[in-house]
Image: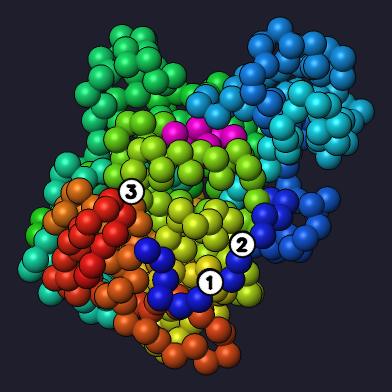
């Protein structure tokens, strides 16, 4: 079940990214500042940011490895690796050819199903002036969180994967972090055969999009958050409550799975994101929080998300984008994904100025002046923290998405057998419709209402997939 409002037919277009930078907030000046980037123009793939010297290729079935090798050799390129589970190979190019030219060469071959650049993704948050909120959790009243917590605060068995810049798992307000039951710590072996060695608390697929990041080869088990964006997301979802410190999370009882797919500047690739999606789904994540995206569509990432939704039954929540324009970002606009826009603070029933809007939006949640956790080490370097404590204020569809991920986790805590589409339908059916104003369908079905979503049960009637509220 999707939004109660009409969604326009989806047309696949080439994928690009919204080049947006990590959001800062707090009480003193950030040094060095992160610069804001503009969104890439829709419909112009030449302007999309992609990894130089590399493309992604999907061969038609069935084709053996030796035949693939012959295609690479005939075109003068070499295979760099694979996106596991999708039968997609990463191809290294020479210095005298662009990814777009290489894509055309591969797609001219009858053995190739499709090819695309390895596009770069960036976080969906925006800069704002430091603001210490008069009441940190002002937005929780709008989404009925306090009364919802009387019904459900979240079960540890429900796992929310944060696909982002990593998570500071040592933060004093984040102690419910996933532990991999199939891995033996520090034995330098991939005990469970999932492709990541010693991934006790998650895996790192981030690549060196920015050379200054100096990452090791991936995947590896280093999930340290060197940006703070992922830790902020994790805190909005599941910061501890009633511990006399910090902030409260939307679903404080659930478990966070850190999956690092973005580098030290908040940049990542669709290949890394696809790897992260399938890693989390296979590891048993119930909800995927994807607070990044862009304009152009990637078949590689789309197929990974479809597997997570259709095969593993994973709820996927993603941000509509922060370009302040009509047109929901990819992957939020996909049918399998719950697309989240951001509402304002000064006008709580209106759209936040930066939020994208359009018929693919499913629900909205507050996205301005949210308060959450950040790594202490980044307080003076990247974040303007509150009194030098590891908390800051931020705005963006990244963070409204995290509120919805937390709400979805609460629904699954109460009814763990619900399907992803039933969870999406529950959020939409119980949402509070807001005025459209000048922005048609900017709020989808409306602002999420946690108490109502937990009170209203979904009961299966007859065949699988048929529900009655």
Q: Which residue is mark 3?
A: 287
Q: Secondary structure at mark 1?
A: loop
Q: Is residue 260 visible?
A: no
Q: Which of the image's four quarters has the C terminus?
A: bottom left
- How far is the residue under mark 3 from the one under mark 1? 23 Å
Q: Quadrant of residue 186?
A: top left
In the image: residue 102, left or right of residue 200: right
Q: Give the labeled residue for mark 1.
A: 7
Instruction: Rate crowding at label 1 as few (under 14), some (14 to 19) or many (20 or more) other CA atoms within 10 Å.
Output: some
Cα distance between the residues tagged 2 and 1: 8 Å
Quarter of the figure with residue 456:
bottom left
Q: Secondary structure at mark 2?
A: loop
Q: Is residue 220 left or right of residue 94?
A: left
* Residue drawn at 59 percent across, 51 percent down: 122
> Farthest front residue?
462
Question: Image check: 11 left or right of 422?
Answer: right
Q: Few, some or many C-alpha atoms within 10 Å of disc 2 (few <14, some 14-19, many ≥20)?
A: few
Q: Which residue is mark 2?
A: 10
Mark linked to residue 128: none
Q: Percent position (x, y) of residue 219? A: 49, 24
Q: Quadrant of the N terminus?
A: bottom left
Point out the stretch of residues depicted in magenta.
Answer: 271-278
2 or 3: mark nearer the eye: 2
Disc 2 and disc 3: Cα gap in Å?
24 Å
Q: Are marks 2 and 1 in contact (CB under 8 Å)?
A: yes
Kindly check if marks 2 and 3 are in contact, taking CB atoms under 8 A apart as contact.
no
Question: Does residue 2 lie above or below 268 as drawn?
Answer: below
């Amino acid at each position: 079940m999707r939004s109660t409002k009409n969604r326009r037919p989806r047309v696949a277009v080439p994928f690009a990214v919204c080049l947006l930078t990590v959001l800062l907030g707090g009480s003193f000046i950030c040094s060095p500042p992160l610069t804001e980037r503009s969104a890439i123009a829709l419909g112009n793939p030449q302007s999309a940011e992609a990894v130089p010297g590399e493309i992604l290729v999907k061969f038609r079935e069935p084709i053996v490895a030796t035949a693939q090798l012959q295609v690479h050799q005939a075109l003068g390129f070499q295979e760099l690796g694979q996106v596991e589970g999708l039968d997609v190979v990463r191809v290294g190019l020479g210095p005298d050819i662009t990814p777009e030219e290489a894509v055309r060469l591969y797609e001219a071959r009858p053995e190739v199903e499709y090819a695309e650049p390895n596009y770069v993704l960036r976080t969906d948050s925006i800069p704002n002036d430091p603001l210490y909120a008069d009441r940190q959790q002002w937005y929780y009243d709008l989404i009925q969180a306090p009364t919802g917590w009387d019904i459900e605060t979240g079960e540890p068995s429900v796992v929310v994967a944060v696909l982002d810049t990593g998570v500071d798992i040592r933060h004093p307000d984040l102690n419910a972090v996933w532990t991999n039951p199939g891995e033996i710590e520090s034995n330098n072996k991939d005990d469970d055969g999932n492709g990541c060695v010693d991934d006790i608390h998650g895996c790192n697929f981030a690549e060196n999009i920015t050379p200054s990041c100096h990452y090791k080869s991936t995947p590896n088990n280093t999930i340290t958050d060197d940006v703070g964006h992922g830790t902020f997301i994790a805190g909005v979802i599941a910061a501890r409550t009633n511990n006399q410190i910090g902030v409260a999370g939307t679903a404080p009882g659930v478990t966070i799975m850190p999956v690092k797919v973005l580098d030290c500047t908040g940049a990542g690739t669709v290949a890394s994101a696809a790897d992260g999606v399938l890693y989390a789904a296979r590891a048993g994540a119930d909800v995927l929080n994807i607070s990044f995206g862009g304009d152009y569509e990637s078949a590689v990432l789309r197929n990974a998300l479809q597997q997570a939704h259709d095969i593993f039954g994973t709820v996927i929540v993603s941000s509509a984008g922060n370009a302040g324009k009509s047109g929901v970002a990819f992957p939020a606009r996909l049918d399998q994904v719950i697309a989240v826009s951001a509402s304002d603070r000064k006008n709580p029933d209106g759209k936040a100025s930066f939020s994208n809007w359009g018929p693919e939006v499913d629900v909205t949640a507050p996205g301005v002046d949210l308060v959450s956790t950040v790594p202490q080490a980044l307080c003076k370097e990247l974040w303007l923290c509150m009194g030098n404590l590891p908390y800051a204020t931020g705005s963006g569809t990244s963070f409204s998405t995290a509120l919805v991920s937390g709400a979805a986790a609460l629904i699954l805590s109460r009814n763990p057998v619900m399907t992803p589409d039933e969870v999406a339908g529950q959020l939409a059916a119980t949402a509070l419709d807001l005025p459209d104003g000048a922005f048609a369908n900017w709020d989808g079905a409306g602002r999420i209402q946690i108490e109502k979503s937990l009170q209203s049960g979904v009961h299966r009637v007859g065949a699988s997939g048929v529900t009655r509220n």
